[in-house]
Image (cartoon, helix red, strand yellow):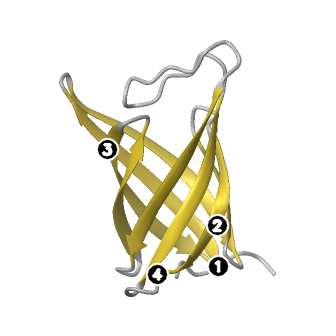
Amino acid sequence: MLDNGVYELSFQHSGPLGAEFGDGLALVRDGRILGSDRFGGVFTGSCQPDPAGDGSLVELRLAIPPHAELITGFTAGADGATLRISTCLHRAAPVAKGVVEIAGEPIEVQVTYVGPLAA
C-alpha cells in the first residue's frame, strides 16, 4: 500500500507524434489521495492494499478544467470533464510504476515518494 506522504508524479504517453510528458503532485493520508497536475487537473480518490500482491489498488476521479488538453490529446469541453481512473501500482520503494488508461489511451505513470506529511 502507498505510505502516507507526498508523492511526485510523472506521466508519459507515446503517441503517433512522439512522446508527451506531464507531472503532478499527490498527497496520501490513510488511504485517501488528493493531487493535481501542473495544468489544473485535480484528482481525488483512494488506495487500498492489493490482495494479490505487494502493491496498491488505486481508484481516482480526475477533474479536468474547461478546454484543457491531456497528454493523450483528449480535450475537455467548455464545461470541463471528469474521468475515472483505476490501476494497480506495484511497490518499488521509493518509486512505484504502473499504466493507467485515460480516455482509451495508455499512460505510463511513475510515483516517487518525496517525504512524510507534516504532523
Q: Residues within 10 Å of mark 4 (few under 14, many from 20)?
A: some
Q: Earlier in the sequence, mark 3 or mark 4?
A: 4
Q: Is residue 55 above or below residue 20?
A: below
Determine contact: label 3, label 1, CB under 8 Å. Answer: no
For the C terminus, the image quarter is bottom right
- Residue 29 on image: x %, y %: 71, 74
- Residue 113 on image: x %, y %: 50, 72
Q: Residues within 10 Å of mark 2 (few under 14, many from 20)?
A: some
**Residue pictured at 61% horizontal, 37% vertical:** 41
Determine contact: label 3, label 2, CB under 8 Å. Answer: no
Measure the C-alpha gap from mark 1 to mark 4.
16 Å
Q: Earlier in the sequence, mark 2 or mark 1?
A: 1
Q: Name the amino acid type tagged 4.
A: Asp
- Position of 3 with respect to 87 (left or right) is right
The numbered mark at residue 4 is 1
Per the image, the residue denoted by label 2 is 46
Per the image, the residue denoted by label 4 is 50
Determine contact: label 3, label 4, CB under 8 Å. Answer: no
